[in-house]
Amino acid sequence: MGTKNKFKYPYKGIQHLDSLAKALSIPIQELIEISRQANNLYIAQPPIKKDSSEKRYTFGAKSRLKKILIRINNIFLKRVQYPDFIQNVKGKSYITNAQKHVNSKIIFNEDIKNFFPSTKRKWILLVWKDFFHFSNEVAECLTNLTTKDGFLPQGAETSTYLANLIFFDIEPQLYANFTNQGLMYTRYVDNISISSKSNIEGNKKSRDGT
């Protein structure tokens, strides 16, 4: 599996809260205070209607939290090297995502239902611990800052980047499995696309078959 199709963070993991505070250019006591209050610093936005029966709920962040989330993006999340199959990062778009599947004979598109509210705090904690290799106390602090009510809040500055990383431990192998079958796999946030330049046997068109 080529390195271009792996998630990579090419820096050492932060092990102490004072080091995190320095990296984010914020006094440590302020960082701890905002981390403890973060759950109440998210603001619910008017729901967006997806269709006649479903609504999408999004959140903004109050200024005290928002400035920290922007710094988390700039210092950590934007420095991640994302694999080619992730299509909603700098230099890519829904257009490049579509181009990956041009001239295919068959295309499967599937949205992950309720992706953001289904992305639980425990998985965000694992991203900070097991992908970034931050210590428990640093990972807990960052998880407090980037989640609300135990889930990933859609619309927050850090949420799309964290959504890209949520499958960091299994997605490269999933991509390799599809590639070995002659299939193209891409993901644009919560939308997964799989295509083939040739016809697919009937038993391989199911989720179990692939």
Image: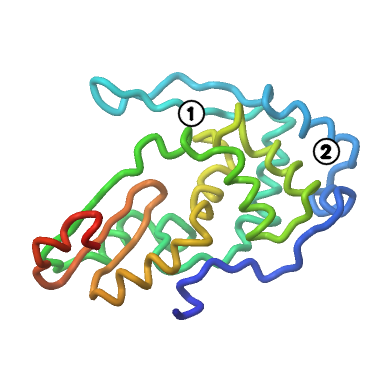
Residue type marked 1: Thr
Real-space CA distance between mark 1 and mark 2, rounded to the nearest whole angstrom = 24 Å
* Foreground pick, 159 / 178: 178
Give how far across and how far down residue 63 sits, in percent: 70, 30
Which comes before the other along the chain, label 1 or label 2?
2
Give how far across and how far down residue 78 sits, in percent: 60, 58
Helix, strand or loop for disc 2: helix
Residue for badge 1: 58
* Foreground pick, 3 / 61: 3
Residue 142 falls in image quadrant: top right
For the N terminus, give its image quadrant: bottom left
Task: Name the residue rendered at 76%, 41% in the picture.
Answer: 141
Q: How is the image coloured?
A: rainbow
Q: Does 124 sit left or right of 205 as displayed? A: right
Task: Name the residue rendered at 47%, 58% in the picture.
Answer: 89
For the C terminus, give its image quadrant: bottom left
**Vertical relation: 118 (above or below) 92:** above
Helix, strand or loop for disc 1: loop
Query: Crowdedness of circle 2 by 10 Å Cα count: few (<14), some, many (20+)?
Result: many
Give how far across and how far down residue 9 sits, in percent: 64, 66
Query: Crowdedness of circle 1 by 10 Å Cα count: few (<14), some, many (20+)?
Result: some
Task: Name the residue rendered at 44%, 62% in the picture.
Answer: 171
Seen from this angle, which residue lies furthest bottom?
2
Residue 5 falls in image quadrant: bottom left
Say how many tags the image has. Answer: 2
Give me the disc on residue 178: none
**Vertical relation: 127 (above or below) 8:** above
Residue for badge 2: 31
Residue type marked 2: Leu
Q: Does 190 sit left or right of 126 as displayed? A: left
